Each structure stands twice: as C-alpha cells, then as structure tokens.
Image (cartoon, rainbow, N blue to C red):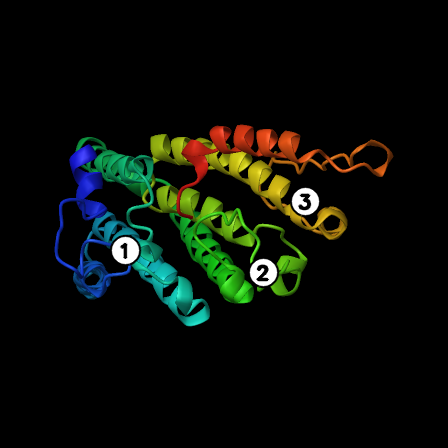
C-alpha cells in the first residue's frame, strides 16, 4: 500500500515537472491516465448497452466512468473558479492511503462477489439506481459548492485568514453549511450502492461519517473564532446535512474578556495535534 501511495504522490520523481504538485507534467500525466480510463470504460459501456451485455459489466463500467469523472471534475472546477490554488493534488487521486485502500477494497469486493455470487449484483436493481442518484447528486452538490466558494475554496483547511477570505453564506451555502462535505459523503456511499457492495457500503458510510464528524467540528471551531457573531447566527439558519453530526457553538469568554494569547496558542496546538490525521485533501 505504501508503494502505491508513494507512486500516487510521485515520490522519487526528480524531473522539474514531476517533483512538486504544481508541475505541469504531473497534471498532464494524471489527466491522461484518468482520461484514457474514462474513455475505455465509456466505450465498453456503450458496447455492452448496444449488444445487451451483462448487467454486471454495465454496472462496473458505470462505476469506473463516474469515478474518473469525479476526479477530473475536482481538478477542472478548481481550475475554473480558483486557478491560483490549482495543482495536481486537486485531482484528489492521492487523497490519502486510507482512500486508496478503500477504492482497492471496493474493487476487490465487487469482483469477488461477481465471480462467486453474481446474483447479489443483479438481485436489487433499485439499489443500483439509488446509488446512481447518490453519486450524481453528491458530485453535483460538491461541485456547485466549489463554484459558489470560488477563490475561498481549498482542498485543505486554511488555518490563516487572508484579507481576501470571506464567509460564504449565499447560493447553496444559504441552506447547507458544508455542501462540499455533504456531496462527498453521499457520493462515496453512492459509489458502493451503485456496484452493490454490501460490505463496503457500510464501511464507506461509517468511515466517511467518522472523518467528517471530526473535520467539521475542527473547521467550525476555526470559523467561529474567525467570525464569532456571524458564524454563530449562520449555524442557526442553515443545515449541516450529514446525519447525526451536530455543530457545537463556542462559549464566549466570561465577562467579555479575551482569551490570553498564550492560552489561545496552547489550545490551537492541542487542536492541531488532534487533527493530524484529518487535514487531508478533500
């Protein structure tokens, strides 16, 4: 797994276009691989559709095509609406070793069940359609959120507030506080429903929920400190969108006092330590 993740992160590459995430070589190579994979599976899907091929083949080609479209979309939406922050990492194919493992496990489960028990992939067509709706709806929700945020959107949490930063509460953000996270959450579950993976459907739901529970709490803590009054009222007027995750409002210092600088720095360091595993690209 480490070897695969190192390759996704281009470790060991020394060429000027490959040794850092802003290199055009990285962008071109990742886009080419995703584009070829997408083209192959779309062609196979159309051939199977015309020749009335197996449903298992159609489902697999749909999954691979939508997976490639999602990662290509991550890059191109960022490039259009926040070009200054666009790097090869915006494809999010190297999100984390956990994400890489999850994708490989989903593929392994699909083909193991398709070979040993193909009926499980064909018995519940409504699950496939539900997964398709989750995948398309989740991807659209996320990409609309990225477009609405514009230059305020980043794949990594921003710990320092720039002069150009602003709290976006318009468009889709008027209703959802974290639409990009909501989109990713339902998209990830939808990919497994689409290919009728019962084990990975449960695993993806739990892993995504746990990840966002911690990440949202951390991010909202930062936002409430940056926008103390505005974000508190925003919590009351919007919906978080992921089940069983609630926002926690920060209590103001007693008697209107400001937290001492040294105490604030200590608390920041404690929060940073808790978030080591959650500051991934997403």
Residue sitting at 62 percent across and 51 percent down? Answer: 177
Dot 1: element: loop
Relative to 261, residue 92 above or below: below
**Drawn side of residue 195 relative to residue 28, left or right:** right
Would you name the residue on which mark 2 appears?
Answer: 165
**Drawn side of residue 197 relative to residue 212, left or right:** left
Q: Which mark is residue 99?
A: none
Q: Looking at the image, is mark 1 or mark 3 earlier in the sequence?
A: 1
**Drawn side of residue 137 relative to residue 31, left or right:** right
| Circle 3 crowding by C-alpha within 10 Å: few under 14, some 14–19, many from 20 | some
* Separation of marks 2 and 1 at Cα, in angstroms: 23 Å
Residue 179 image offset from top left, x and y in percent: 55, 53
Residue sitting at 44 percent across and 36 percent down? Answer: 278
Residue 177 visible here: yes
Residue 48 image offset from top left, x and y in percent: 19, 60
Q: Which mark is residue 224?
A: 3
Q: Give the quadrant of residue 246.
A: top right
Would you name the residue on which mark 1 appears?
Answer: 21
Dot 3: element: helix
Q: Looking at the image, is mark 2 or mark 1 earlier in the sequence?
A: 1
Residue 105 image offset from top left, x and y in percent: 26, 34
Q: Quadrant of the N terminus?
A: top left
């Amino acid at each position: 797994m480490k070897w695969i993740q190192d390759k996704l992160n281009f470790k060991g590459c020394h060429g000027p276009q490959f040794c850092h995430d802003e290199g055009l070589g990285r962008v071109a190579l990742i886009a080419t691989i995703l584009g070829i994979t997408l083209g192959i599976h779309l062609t196979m899907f159309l051939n199977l559709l015309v020749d009335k091929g197996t449903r298992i083949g159609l489902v697999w080609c749909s999954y691979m095509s939508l997976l490639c479209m999602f990662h290509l979309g991550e890059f191109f939406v960022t490039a259009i609406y926040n070009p200054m922050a666009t790097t090869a990492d915006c494809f999010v194919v190297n999100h984390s070793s956990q994400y890489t493992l999850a994708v490989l496990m989903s593929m392994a489960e699909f083909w193991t069940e398709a070979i040993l028990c193909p009926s499980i992939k064909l018995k519940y067509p409504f699950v496939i359609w539900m997964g398709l709706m989750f995948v398309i709806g989740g991807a659209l929700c996320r990409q609309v959120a990225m477009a609405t945020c514009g230059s305020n959107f980043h794949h990594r949490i921003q710990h320092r507030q720039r002069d150009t930063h602003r709290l976006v509460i318009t468009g889709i953000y008027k209703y959802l506080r974290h639409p990009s996270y909501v989109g990713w959450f339902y998209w990830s579950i939808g990919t497994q429903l689409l290919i009728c993976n019962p084990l990975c459907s449960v695993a993806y739901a739990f892993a995504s929920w746990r990840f966002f529970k911690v990440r949202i709490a951390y991010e909202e803590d930062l936002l409430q400190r940056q926008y103390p009054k505005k974000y508190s009222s925003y919590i009351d007027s919007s919906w978080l969108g992921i089940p069983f995750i609630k926002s926690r409002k920060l209590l103001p210092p007693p008697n209107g006092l400001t937290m001492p600088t040294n105490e604030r720095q200590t608390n920041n360091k404690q929060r940073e330590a808790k978030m080591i595993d959650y500051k991934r690209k997403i």
